[in-house]
Image (cartoon, rainbow, N blue to C red):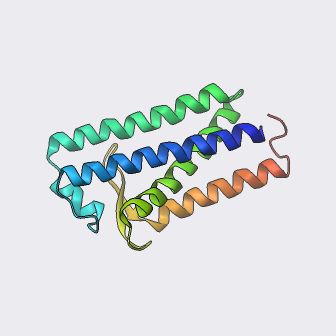
Amino acid sequence: MIIKLVMLAIFGIAMAHLEGVVVVYLRKALGMPDSESNKESVGKFPERFLKIEMTREAATIIMLIVIAYLTGGSWIEKGIYFLWTFAFWDLFYYLSLYILIKWPPKLSTIDVLFLIPKPWIAPVWFPIAVSGLTILIIFILVVIGVFGTF
């Protein structure tokens, strides 16, 4: 199980970087400054691009569900693997953006976390904290053997 968690973390990190690169290119293609808040950016998005972006978000969630389904045995295991991979993806998405374009400039920067079903808006520290806590809790529960061998 530890090997699966490590591989899923690597998958989440790679997927996060890919998403970060896509967002950097999208911002550049639409002429958005790197320093601009995503909340401000969404207001400038043409409706067509918002719908396209929603499909990218849906595809991301589908990929995370599929990888969790393929690697997990029981439904509990599949759920844990989904949350684990999602947390690594989310955490490293922000790290990737920061490495690529120094965004967000601070943890209190307001971001649009998701567009589906409607925009979820919060400071960047919130998804980072939730993801970090998710990783920590799953790690501790696995180490102390709460999940057994699944």
Q: Residue at x 48, y 64 (%)?
A: 126
| Residue 99 in the image, given as x and y percentages of width and height | 44, 62
The answer to whether residue 7 is above or below residue 103 is above
Q: Residue at x 15, y 44 (%)?
A: 47
| Residue 15 in the image, given as x and y percentages of width and height | 49, 42
**Which image quarter holds the C terminus?**
top right
- Residue farthest along the front direction in this orientation: 100
**Left of 30 or right of it: where is 96?**
right
Q: Quadrant of residue 52?
A: top left
Q: In which quarter of the image is residue 28?
A: bottom left
| Residue 5 in the image, given as x and y percentages of width and height | 70, 42
Q: Residue at x 40, y 46 (%)?
A: 19
The answer to whether residue 68 is above or below residue 147 is above
**Which image quarter holds the N terminus?**
top right
**Left of 66 or right of it: where is 114?**
left
The answer to whether residue 41 is above or below residue 82 is below
| Residue 108 in the image, given as x and y percentages of width and height | 41, 73
**Left of 28 or right of it: where is 108?**
right
**Left of 43 or right of it: where is 96?**
right
